[in-house]
Image (cartoon, coloured by chain):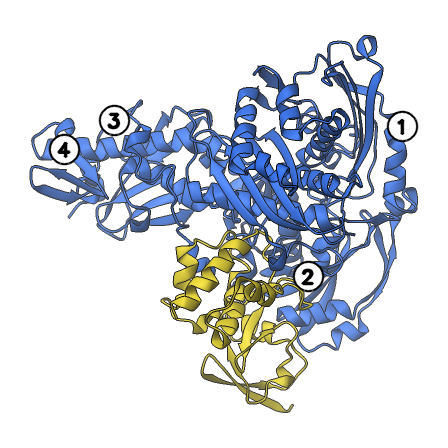
Amino acid sequence: MEKVNFQINAKQYSTAKEEKPLLWYLRDDAKLKGTKFGCGKGLCGACTVKVNGEAVRSCQTMLSELSGAKVETIESLGDNHPLFVAWKKYNVPQCGYCQPGQIMSASALLDKNKRPTSEQVSEHMSGNICRCGTYQRISNAIQNAGVNS
Amino acid sequence: MIDITSVSRRDFLKWTALSTSGLILGSVGCTSKNSNITEFSPNLFITIPSSGKIKLVNHRSEMGNGVRTSIIMLLCEELNVSPNDIEIVQATGNSKYGDQNTDGSKSIRLNYERLRVMAAAAREMIETAAATQWGTKRSQLKSENGFVIYNGKKAPYGEFSLEASKLEVPKAPTLKNRSEFKLLEKKIPLIDGHDLAAGKAVFGMDVEVENMVYACLVRCPSVGGKVISHDDTQTLKVAGVIKTIQLSQIPNPVGVQNAIAVIANNTWAAFDGAEKLKVEWDLGDNSKNFKGPYEDYLKDKLKEADKKVHSVGDVDKNRTKKSVKQIYHSPFLVHAPMEPLVATAHVEKKRVKLWTPSQDPQRVRKSVASFLKLPLNKIEVNVTFLGGGFGRKSQADFSLEAVALSQLLEGPVKVVWRREDEIQHGFYHAQAFQEIEATLDSKGVPVTWEHKTVYPTIMSLFIPSSQTPAKWETGMGATSLPYNIPNISVKTAKVKSPVRIGWLRAVCNIQHSFAINCFVDKLARSQGIDPVDYRKLILGRPVKRKTERGPQDTARLISVINQCKNMSGWKDKVIHKKKMGFSAHNSFRSYIAMAVEIEGSSAEDVTVKQVDVVIDCGKFVNKDTIIAQMEGSVVFGIGALFYGKIDVVDGVIQQSNFHDYPVLRHEEMPIVNVQVVISDEEPGGVGEPGVPVIMPALANAITSAFGNEISSFPVKA
């Protein structure tokens, strides 16, 4: 079978070029379990990672599309990343399951705009569901992280 | 070096921890065989080794309720150690810990006192041991951050482990009073906060066991239906699929459904194989007996609501001519925790290991023991982090599926539910129809209150013949009406259901508080009285009464209503024509009032701008967790009122994922302000009681703003 080569968190990976979602490659093959499965249909954002700097739903991103791509997952962020610091300051997580996806979405937003308005945060983050309802804290944390990064 | 044989009192010691939960067994002073570390462990929750970190047990399930932090705070407060300096040990399911069923908003109610007593006793023993060693009295030294301090000397607790383990456990240690609290009633960040944010916490979904296979199940669309035939030709062509295997029903209350399991060597192959599986089903009696929408069946049952379950005074003799009446409808709801259901099991010859995001590991343990006919002590139930629960993960079905498959396959199996499986094979919050009729006196105060409430009972899960709500169900709001009304009757009817009914965050308080709080607003409107003032009018003088689910003190409800009115600037906002709604409810021993401000021009385009919350939950543990739970309840409740709806047609669920079962999203988040009342009353719950308050408050705001009365939800569907 044809191979596809790409990077995950700056490490080179090579695997069969198949119609398998990146999500399950990350979780079951690369053993990077910070990226979560929530809906499998690109509706909830729990599986958000960055591909070439853009936030994508890894459950809808096939391995076959990843030739030469740079994938970044929650594991790529250092423990003292401004988003983690802000997440701690606002004590954001409840159950925590959606949070890695929220943070990767937030990271993609802050890459482009360090001072997003609350409307810009809302719009950008509305693809990421948090059933526990941590949205208010997420908003505050993103704006705080933007200021401090 | 300390030798285990020198520990004189390492025998198991029984003592009562002044608790309602009975005996706590603990070993005092034991040494593991392969080390020279003595462990002082006066009870099951606390271990102070002679060197290394203090180990504290959390026995409740962490699902966003912040309970791991709260339980550890209770222990650390009285132990005088920092939550950052200890190691948390997550308990397996075992009745020796007392109640572990993390449901019913009772983790703090059950543990507030007993864990503090255990921790205070341990600290006193360490202090006594230190005092003896240093030739002084316990009263002369102090303990702080895991150290004993006296006269310029400072030593970690562990140095006194051996001596402390020789002491009697004090039966009535002195607990701190509020002014001495370093942790309790403060805002303490979650101990697991960083691990959760960074994706390092291990959820049920993240469990991996050596040599395990993955299973995705195609379950019968209706409860109790059977497989007629299946074709797995295409399934077996999927790379990674190993085989398909039929799984038989395990009856309620476990409720495993007839299914075909696709077994694979990775999750995606199992999912893909399941998509490609063709199954012909016999949908069974539930489908035949409930033709068409279940809603039609249930609506008719309201007319049959003549079974009186609660009565005060005499409604029939005291009706006035001034009557107000309304019918209310609330749909089936499903939990939709962000982590779909999942469990990993390894059934060995005479031993079972299970890793499950369970709210109720003891129930799982008992169910597994009964299913496999093994003694309880052969079943190990490891509790992972739960990616949300909301009552769904109190059920044992997903854990038992993994056990049953592991038994059939003779190896470890991880069963992973897709979102569609979770939405369509739930234990649903019951659909309900209600009618409330009140007659009023000349001042507009109700003289009679007649409440008919009709919905399938959760008890039908345990006793198939159960057809009317249990007392504890009507006790969630309907028979615990806080208003001072002299003549009350509550009636129900017999109702069956084609789907399983389960607990969902706040349970029957959802429908009852919705109807009651909307109806109180309707009465207020009929009298031209402000809804907040009207609530106070009909609450009248404060009363303390016994209800089905505990004591009720309406002074506390009146107080949160007054505080919420002030906090929200209600009067001023009403004068300035802001679109406002109000509600107040007592459940799970807590009292909550909410004021909601909305924007928009109709029910369809309404958005929630701000919610002001006042909660009196008695004595509490982590202030920030209470605030977070109120924020979360507001989000959960708005989502349900706007969009929540599960349709059952021919016994089959019609929704499948977040596109047709929407929940609240970020852009719809209001500003939420929370005020927590400082109180000396016994602890109340916080995880659930906010939900039944936000829903009618929002409905009342919409009714009041746009004129069309909201008596049914979802309002945006």
Compute the Cα span from label 4 to label 2: 58 Å
Please name which of the two marks, 4 or 2, marks the residue nearer to the observer.
4
Q: Amino acid at mark 2?
A: Arg
Residue B303, which numbered label?
1
Please name which of the two marks, 1 or 3, marks the residue nearer to the observer.
1
Q: Earlier in the sequence, mark 1 or mark 2?
A: 1
Q: Is disc 2 surrounded by few (<14), some (14 to 19) or many (20+) residues within 10 Å?
A: many
Colour chosen for chain B: blue
Q: Please report the residue visible at 67 percent of the width from the left and 33 percent of the height from the top.
A: B509
Secondary structure category for the residue under label 1: helix
Chain letter of the residue carrying label 3: B
Q: Position of residue B664 (x, y in %)?
A: 65, 54
Secondary structure category for the residue under label 3: loop
The residue identified by callout 2 is B418
The residue identified by callout 4 is B141
Q: Earlier in the sequence, mark 3 or mark 4?
A: 4
Chain letter of the residue carrying label 2: B
Q: Are marks 1 and 4 on the same chain?
A: yes
Q: Are marks 3 and 4 on the same chain?
A: yes
Compute the Cα span from label 3 to label 4: 19 Å
Q: Please report the residue visible at 58 percent of the width from the left and 60 percent of the height from the top.
A: B412
Q: Position of residue B135 (x, y in %)?
A: 7, 31
Chain letter of the residue carrying label 4: B
Q: Are marks 1 and 2 on the same chain?
A: yes
Do labels 4 and 2 touch, CB within 8 Å?
Answer: no
Q: Is residue B152 visible?
A: yes
Q: Is disc 1 surrounded by few (<14), some (14 to 19) or many (20+) residues within 10 Å?
A: few
Q: Amino acid at mark 4?
A: Leu
